[in-house]
Amino acid sequence: MKKIDIKKLHASYKDFDKQNVTVAGWIKSVRNSKTFGFMDLNDGTSFNGVQVIFNDSLNNYEAISHLNAGSSVIVTGTLVCTPENKQPFEIQANAVEIVNATTDEYPLQKKHHSVEFLREIAYLRPRTNLFNAVFRIRSVAAYAIHKYFQENDYMYVHTPLITTTDCEGSDQMFKITTFNFDDLPYTKDGKVDMSKDLFGKKSYITGSGQLHGEAFALAYSKIYTFGPTFRTENSNTKTHANEFWMIEPEIAFCDLDGLMDIEEEMLKSVVSYVLEKCSTEINFLDKFVSNGLRKKLEKLVTSKFTRIDHSEVIKILQKAPVKWEFTPEEGGDIAKEHEKYITEYFGGPVFIKNWPKDIKAYYMKLNPDGKTVAAVDLEVPGAGELMGGSQREENYDKIIARCDQMGVDKSAIDWYLNLRKFGSCVHSGFGMGFERLVMYLTGVDNIRDSIPFPRTPKNCEF
Amino acid sequence: MKKIDIKKLHASYKDFDKQNVTVAGWIKSVRNSKTFGFMDLNDGTSFNGVQVIFNDSLNNYEAISHLNAGSSVIVTGTLVCTPENKQPFEIQANAVEIVNATTDEYPLQKKHHSVEFLREIAYLRPRTNLFNAVFRIRSVAAYAIHKYFQENDYMYVHTPLITTTDCEGSDQMFKITTFNFDDLPYTKDGKVDMSKDLFGKKSYITGSGQLHGEAFALAYSKIYTFGPTFRTENSNTKTHANEFWMIEPEIAFCDLDGLMDIEEEMLKSVVSYVLEKCSTEINFLDKFVSNGLRKKLEKLVTSKFTRIDHSEVIKILQKAPVKWEFTPEEGGDIAKEHEKYITEYFGGPVFIKNWPKDIKAYYMKLNPDGKTVAAVDLEVPGAGELMGGSQREENYDKIIARCDQMGVDKSAIDWYLNLRKFGSCVHSGFGMGFERLVMYLTGVDNIRDSIPFPRTPKNCEF
């Protein structure tokens, strides 16, 4: 008989009442008496598994009774609705085929495992309740992002990963090569001869698709990217990873206010979709990982995001009855402690806009005051900065001047600068770190637990 | 006034009849008489632009009349339905704001440009009709893939790009490093000291997410990946690129027949969606790039894919009245000329299954005959191999034996091999090169024209 996803059974178990079904999956636990037993079974298509009842009329009753967690089985039996029980239905087994019985070597047992231990077995941790919930939300959130942009007529653009130019600066990028490190070719003056490498020059894996995204926005008006990005930061914190996924929308004929409208609408749309599709997972995480998670997400959907200038934020921070570790200063950056305070102060998400130009990038639009740029960071309660964006400098002469002031190598990005001559227009874009969003949506507080196989300094296992 | 996407106007121009609208975009061409002129304008949200009529009551009439292609403008005017004309509506301008006028330096003129020339200005080519069509189909097809898998309850998994293990073999992978090539650290015995690199060992960017995908399939039953992959091949052909996107679904409790069912259903679903959403683009490409494109795609949706053993294909090829460049041989590979013949022979897509084990990978399920593996390639008319998949060897002892026979380094993939001990089951997966699909959907015959910024040997511009 064709097997049925357990998710389908949960969605329409009443239709299957008293019917014969086949499910296949992995055992969470087995408990039994002399003549019958219960098996918690899940196939991972759903957060909730199914309870299977088996009895000693099965000729492999003894073997089933001794199965370890993680064993794979195929169960055929009668689905029976059980409105009086906690679980809405169960399966009374006619046959249990043991596909692969795990031994005691299997590292996941029915007990609490620390997230640190689970990271050491990253290839098995998706089988736990925690990661079942987190990675399903990750998948659903990724789709919600595509859905939002596609339904609003944005083009999805695959910007290149391998690059010789980058908007974040090459000192933060991984170099790539086809050379054998122990047999490098050299030039006459003793340098490694990069002209002999596959691309004929130094190349990197990218830290951002923004520059290429802008080129496409100036053709299609509304585009977004969604792909992996890389940074070489040798930093072991809860929020840094060397490989992460980014969404970078870019919109032509759109100023900073228009950008904030889009960021707000997109985020609300994604959160709503996840609340709708992953209600069980959110409830689990609310209970065991981050109390108040559901309330936080539901509140976000209906709240109006505050929009405030950076300079006003500094004034609020300076007046705050708080002893800061980092003193808030006009023209200065905003620390994590400040982000936290300001979202609590306004009781919700806050757009901080018009930042001091000296702490921001060359491509951001200089405001008429000559001191600030039209940049905006979105701060959300409990996660800090979730998105960073700006109106881009669309004037050729002005962006050239900014490059010169900031020592940016113009030759590597001449094509990008040319966009300012060839049908330039007011345009804006933002970047959202996808792991940051997953952390916000799930309440997990370490980036290592928001991505399937995290890459951090000295950690590239699996 | 808030600007409207030209796509929206095309979708519902009747609702806007006689109304004032604002559109913003880039000029394709301007022609004018003494007192009035026509402007072809597009904002890229739609394949078709809009015709704007402007007259000398506008105080900048002269300037507008002399605008070059590529100039950006904001037009406000009255939308008027024109059922008697070729285009269903036009805009009679009340105001044309010139945002950025291009000079003669602008490389795209209203004439035919070769695809080779356009590759040299990859940052501008999305503004041409050809790439407007190709990259929109690319975007829509990407979404169709997500939609198919998500609606069928697959988990989207972001497998890692940076890796120390790989299913395709490290000789085809780019190495990554944070080292400065001209200041490398060495061990005492004169080797480059990779333990001093960020991850403490040699690391690569991946050629496949399959191994990690399998780990997730054995937790969630049905997963797919969609991300970039890399190969170092120094090969300048129409079908090779060093960076490309892959989709790699993996399904637990699924054998080779089940896999072919999924491949067929998925492909039909994606082609149908593209035909529905990109009808104008398909018509354009059918007319100017690949005659018969629409018919080919429509036929695919309704055809039943042939399923045939590799050994039977060899017999058909051997009997064929064709002088082959490569002689088809039992146990041998199938060349491009053979792929072409076999899809023509059957008049549609063909699954070639059960391949000689010696030309396939270690992880493929050995068939009971001991000579073939449960692998399957999907060949489609006009594009050759579109997908390659297999049932995976799920038995621990057998996969170990295959690794040993084929000289595979087991230590790097011990976690992957362990999956065969921890709840293993029959499982299968396939890979589809996304650019190959885009080429099939658009009829473009060079991979360089199917991806926004192609990376090929000696070519990593932009």
Image (tube, coloured by chain):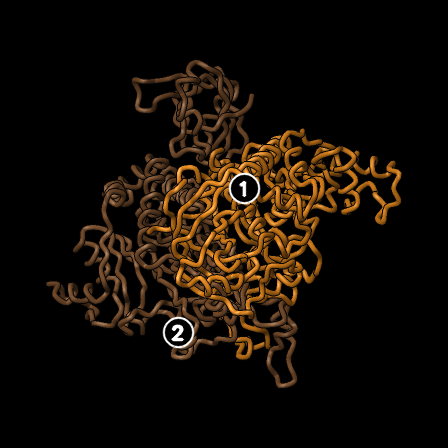
Chain colours: A orange, B brown
Picture layout, residue B386 above or below residue B355: above
Would you say residue B103 is visible in this rendering?
no
| Residue ID for mark 1 | A85
Which one is nearer the viewer's eye here, B146 or B207?
A: B146
Q: Nearer the viewer, mark 2 or mark 1?
A: 1
Disc 1 secondary structure class: loop
Q: In which quarter of the image is residue B335?
A: bottom left
Residue type at the position of mark 2: Lys
| Residue ID for mark 2 | B398
Residue A364: assigned label: none
- Quadrant where the image shows the C terminus of chain A: bottom right
Disc 2 secondary structure class: helix
Residue at x 55%, y 70% (from the top left corner) = A105
Left or right: B227 as drawn, with respect to B428: right
Q: How far apart are marks 2 and 1 (CA)?
A: 44 Å
Q: Mark 2 lies on which chain?
A: B
Say how many tags the image has: 2
Which one is nearer the viewer's eye here, B370 or B283?
A: B370
